[in-house]
Image (spheres, rainbow, N blue to C red):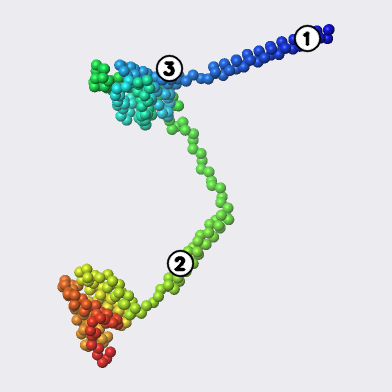
Amino acid sequence: MIFDFRFSIFDCARRRWAGRTLLVVCTLALFALSGCKGGKPAQATDDGAADANVIEKSAEKGPVRMVVRLSPKEPRLSDMVEMEVVVEAEQGVEVNPPPFGKAVGDFLVRDYTQKPAVTTDNKCVRRFLYQLEPAHAGRHLIRSITIEFTDKRADTEAKNEPVLLESEPIEIVVTSELGDKTPNLADLAPMHAPMPLPPSPVWRWLLVVLGLGAAVAGALIWRRRMRQNAAAGVVRRSPEETANAEMRGLLAENLHGKGEFKEFYVRLTAIVRRYIEATTGIRAPEQTTEEFLRDIRERQVFPSERAAQFAQFLEAADMVKYAAMQPGTRQVEEAIARAQEFVGLPSALTPLRKTCDE
């Protein structure tokens, strides 16, 4: 009995101590939770108190309310000032943005953004954001922010009449890191004396010289190989093959069929002249027709009868080239046939009579 009585007293005390411990723990937990909730900083809303670093002005007229906020409150000369214009109007009221140009008071407008309109509780909220740059240190005055709105609601008395809503003037003090001191070049630290460059190791210059030499040698070798390849790729053709290729190219262009007779005869006689120069050594392309024919007679390139036929060919071509004569189809075919015969090619027409000397 004594043992049971002592055990009962001990068990009761133990349970009472556990209950008190649980109560203390719960109390501390509640204090901790309440402390976490209370430690969170309050956020400023459009309708609540402004932040300590924000200047806020508001104005209201009829169905429109305007709030102007500027931050920071005390900017430095190197800071950008953010200005937000919030306009809240009822549905059916048309609002125009603030009519700013390149400046707002003593501030320069560096950027402008218009946020999409938000409609809540039969009201339309519009936000206009500006980035302002102070022009100088000291006091800056924004006299007023003005917006224009037109009430187009059906139950309004001032329907379709524009109304102006202006805010109060706003004054901002712009500070400078120098304060009231005027910058002076004499306050700058003196210039350091010239410092010699560290000596460059000799091996660097040797590497530069070797690199340049290798580049020059490589360029010379490449150029020589290119010349060799070009020389190996050139196929020497005989005067007859050259004249034949040029004649086929000229006839393929069909200049005479297009009525371009002067160009056709110039190139046709040039083919014959180059062929005679390549086979006889007479500088035919640089000579006039008279000089060319005289050299042919003196050097006896052709027999007399063939030389006369060649002279007729050149003189007929000169009439087309220089006298603007329009040859007929038969004359063109005759000129082509004679040119082909003079360069050793067969022609479709009756060939020229050959003399015994040929």
Q: Secondary structure at mark 3?
A: loop
Q: Residue at x 27, y 73 (%)?
A: 251
Q: Quadrant of residue 156?
A: top left
> Which one is in front, 9 or 99?
9
> Which one is in front, 277 or 167?
167
Q: Amino acid at mark 1?
A: Ser
Q: Secondary structure at mark 1?
A: helix
Look at mark 3 in the image and give the residue it sits on: 48
Q: Residue at x 78, y 9 (%)?
A: 8
- Observer-side mark, 2 or 1, equals 1
217 is higher (above) or lower (below) than 27: below
Outermost residue on the right side: it is 2
Mark sitting earlier along the chain (3/2): 3
The answer to whether residue 136 shows anywhere in this view is no
Outermost residue on the bottom side: it is 356
Mark sitting earlier along the chain (2/1): 1
- Crowding at dot 3, Cα within 10 Å, few <14 / some 14-19 / many 20+, comes out as few
The answer to whether residue 70 shows anywhere in this view is yes
Q: Amino acid at mark 3?
A: Gly
Look at mark 1 in the image and give the residue it sits on: 8
Q: Quadrant of residue 10?
A: top right
> Which one is in front, 76 or 103?
103
Look at mark 2 in the image and give the residue it sits on: 223
Q: Secondary structure at mark 2?
A: helix
Outermost residue on the front side: it is 1
x, y percent for residue 253: 27, 70
Mark sitting earlier along the chain (3/1): 1
Q: Residue at x 20, y 85 (%)?
A: 308
**Labels 3 and 1 touching (C-beta < 8 A):** no
**Labels 3 and 2 touching (C-beta < 8 A):** no
Q: Residue at x 30, y 72 (%)?
A: 249
